[in-house]
Image: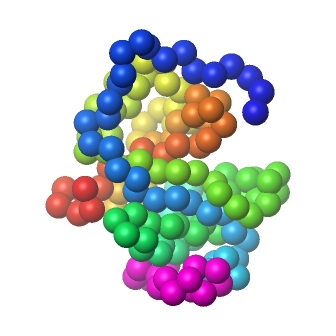
Amino acid sequence: MTGPTPELPSTPLALTHLTLDHLAIATPDLESGSAPYRALGLHPEGPDETVESQGVRVRAFVVGGSLIELLSPTRPDSPVATFLTRRGAGLHHLALRVADLDAEMRRLRAAGAVFLNEEPRAGRAGTRVAFLHPKWGAGTLIELVEHPAGHGA
């Protein structure tokens, strides 16, 4: 990846609670995209879910304390559809679980982070999410995820 890397302060900026929430895999079709994970013995966690605000259908597989989420576009103008056109199926983003999304967004913005969205959006399973620009994430799209109180955090 070319381009500038983020300027980070000399003191670490630790998230208040950092856990890998999920890895998201873009696939044109949830059934064919699920085949390798089913062959590994994984089973979907609940029913598939449509996230209208992001134009995707999501199928989640539990792996330890995290998830693998398969993302399939529901419309041609969704970010995942664009990703598939440009790069093909594969790793789309990694997601980190945070306790307080608003506080983390403020803290990271103060440190120079660039978000793709100004405000948190609705995510899968009642979560609130925000995406950091891949240029800020050294070429990786990073999602911050806040679970509803009492769920998954």
Give the tally of numbered discs.
0
The magenta region covers: 35-48
Residue 21 visible to the viewer:
yes
Residue 30 percent location from the top left of the image: 64, 78
Q: Quadrant of the C terminus?
A: bottom left
Q: Identify which residue is drawn at 43% across, 22% down.
A: 109
Q: Identify which residue is drawn at 43% across, 71% down.
A: 63
- Judge whether 28 appears above or below 78 on screen: below
Q: Quadrant of the N terminus?
A: top right
Q: Main secondary structure of the magenta part?
A: loop
Residue 128 visible to the viewer:
no
Q: Residue furthest top?
A: 10
Q: Would residue 102 appear left or right of 46 to someone viewing this image?
A: left
Residue 84 percent location from the top left of the image: 76, 59
- Judge whether 29 appears above or below 107 on screen: below
Q: Residue furthest right?
A: 86
Q: Identify which residue is drawn at 37% across, 69% down.
A: 64
